Amino acid sequence: MDRYVNVISGLPRTGKTTLLENITGKPEYKGAVIVRMDEVGNLLWRERQAVRKGSTDTELTPTEKVYRNEATRNEIKKQLIVKNAGIVFSEMPLLTRQYHQRPLVEIVSSAEWYIQGIEKDIANRNSPPSPVNPSRVHLNVVLLYASPDIVRERVEKDKENPRSKSDAGHINIFLDAALKFEFPDCYPYLLVDTTDESLGADQQRIEEVIAFLMGSISPQELASLNFERMPEAVADLEEARRQAEIAGIKRL
């Protein structure tokens, strides 16, 4: 049985949580496992992960944040191998190639190796050994982007919501992440603009993402969509970096 790792990625406040909840609420994904990086971090560090009062960052060190990503990837791997999950959804920013994107590809490849090995072991227990149709683990990544001005509006609206528990409670968290972000070079992905918050645009995004996850968008169609959207995504990223410079945020 093939397995699927579906990751919703992007900068803070680009709509990862909302999109993930909308998609996993669909009947076709009933029973899918959901692994959220923030929940993994909460299990490891609890209140240290929350944004400090009067600050724009958490108490976690940069190295601890790298480990948080590793712990999230390992949880995905455990769900695939130990829990035999057919579909795993995850919500991760995947900011950098070295610490986030390439390690994700490696963990998926490693999980596939273990799953195929387990299948072979089980088949060899039979006498005579059973034929094996090796399972594959497929990685699907959706990369969200949005206008920095819209992100700023979302942050301000959220400040007025007393029930909000988001760790991205300051525009500088978005701007700081923009300085670190690198477009992926090790896996195909679907670029999705979340700037338009209308119901029609939201529904269209959901339908397109599900089509991508289901394999209904061909590689040629995917390349065409991303080629069309990339200039805008790059422009939004550059504007965020410009605003970060104005705010005095430095690239580490």
Image: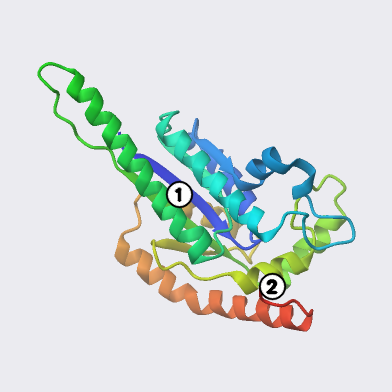
Q: Position of residue 137 (x, y in %)?
A: 34, 44
Q: Which quarter of the rendered picture does the C terminus lie within?
A: bottom right
Q: Secondary structure at mark 1?
A: helix
**Is 108 above or below relative to 183?**
above
Q: Which residue is mark 1?
A: 210
185 and 154: which is toward the camera: 185
Q: Position of residue 69 (x, y in %)?
A: 57, 51
Q: Secondary structure at mark 2?
A: helix
Query: Is residue 223 shown left or right of residue 28?
Result: left
Q: Position of residue 99 (x, y in %)?
A: 52, 60
Q: Quadrant of residue 121?
A: top left
Query: Is residue 42 shown left or right of residue 222?
Result: right
Q: Which quarter of the rendered picture does the N terminus lie within?
A: top left
Q: Which residue is mark 2?
A: 148
Which numbered disc, 1 or 2, marks the residue that appears first in the sequence?
2
Q: Disc 2 residue type?
A: Pro
